[in-house]
Amino acid sequence: MSQEDYSGFMVFAEQHDGVIHPVTFELLGKARELAEKKGSKVYAALLGYNVGSLSSELIYYGADRVYVVDSEKLKVFDVMHYKDAFLKVIEKAKPEAILMGATNTGRTLAPRISAALKTGLTADCTDLFIDEKGNFIQVRPAFSGNIFAHIGTKTKPAMATVRYRTFKAIEKDTSRKGEVEKVEYSGPDDTGYKVLEKIPREKVNISDAEVIVAVGKGLKKKEDLKIIEDLAKLLNATVGASRPLVDDDWISRDHQVGFSGNIVKPKIYIAIGISGSPQHTVGMKDSGIVISINKDPNAPIAEYSDYFIVGDLYEVVPKLIEEIKKK
Ligand code: FAD
């Protein structure tokens, strides 16, 4: 089979316990745009156990054909089963490119698929497009976000992961029609991996937050996070953080905003004691209203701010809390 015979854009439909991760819909939207440019099709790969009923949802969001692998072996995320089952789908569909969410699942599975197919994988893409020669191009930050590299992959299928909230899903259209094709997977009984138990933990979905109160190294010690949490609670906001606070173990990575954290687009973003490095602002620059509190009037975050309060956070934040409580 020649490389020319690969066509169409395949989205890995990530689902957990029968709920599709919204990054899937965003990727389907982008895949539609790419496929229309090439005059080709959009495929979705749906893997799991008792998941067949989710196919129509994928069609409503842009898939022309859904490949479903339904097997008890795919009930929990055993990456070896998922890899082998997904490879079967790819072998059947022969897509020009595969798009996956840069989620924990996508980041675990994608490199294994790319290694098995001996093809290129571009992680954390910020854009995808078809160039004037019809090549599929992947854009991603390089050199700590200082340049955007445009990457073309010579081998097919090309592979790309994209973070949640990078693209927009197209409007759900329940009148859309598509095909569903079942793919059999038997797989070994023992892959050598054991999923022992799911450990429940506090899950912060900062990417969906409408109001974020984010804090950075302006904070002197971990205990002082309390005043930020108090302000966030009053505003019904989610707490965000710059990376140094995560690296120092003051707060979990779920809260990190930026290049190596989460991309956020809240209506209101309050940046407290955050300087505004390119690695931070890349994650929050599309926020609605940005309010900053900083001692330094020349902090780079000023450029992204609609309102800039010059002052010591230890004075400004308690005053803000006091005023809000009066209302
Ligand atoms: P600082 O740059 O130290 O700024 C602290 C700010 O607080 C200053 O502006 C200061 O004026 C102000 N301040 C100090 N005291 C007070 C006070 N009492 N009251 C009010 N203001 C005060 N960073 C991220 O955030 N997210 C990422 O995803 C990320 N990814 C990265 C990936 C790579 C590969 C690399 C190399 C770096 C990454 N970084 C990331 C780190 C980034 O380069 C910066 O180091 C980081 O964003 C700085 O965090 P900060 O603004 O909290 O701290």
Image (tube, rainbow, N blue to C red):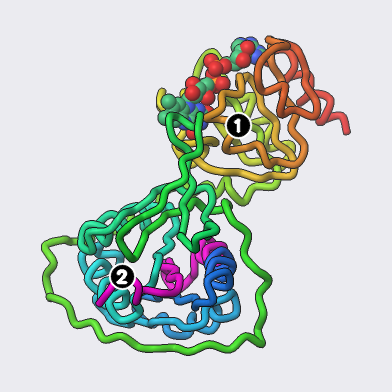
Residue pictured at 33% horizontal, 57% vertical: 154
Residue 188 visible in the current orientation: yes
Q: Position of residue 77 (x, y in %)?
A: 30, 64
* Depicted 240 relative to depicted 186: above or below: above
Q: Amino acid at mark 2?
A: Gln
Residue 77 is left or right of residue 271, and the answer is left
Locate residue 59: give its quadrant.
bottom right
User: In the rendered view, would you say 54 is above or below 155?
Assistant: below
Residue that carries the numbered disc 2 in the rendered image: 3
Q: Residue 276, position in %: x, y?
A: 61, 23
Total labels: the figure holds: 2
Residue 239 location in percent, x, y? 60, 36
- Residue wearing tag 1: 281
Give 276 or 99, whichever is nearer the viewer.
99
Quadrant where the C terminus lies? top right
**SS at circle 2:** helix
Residue at the location (69% across, 16% down)? 294
Between 260 and 273, the one lying in front of the other is 260
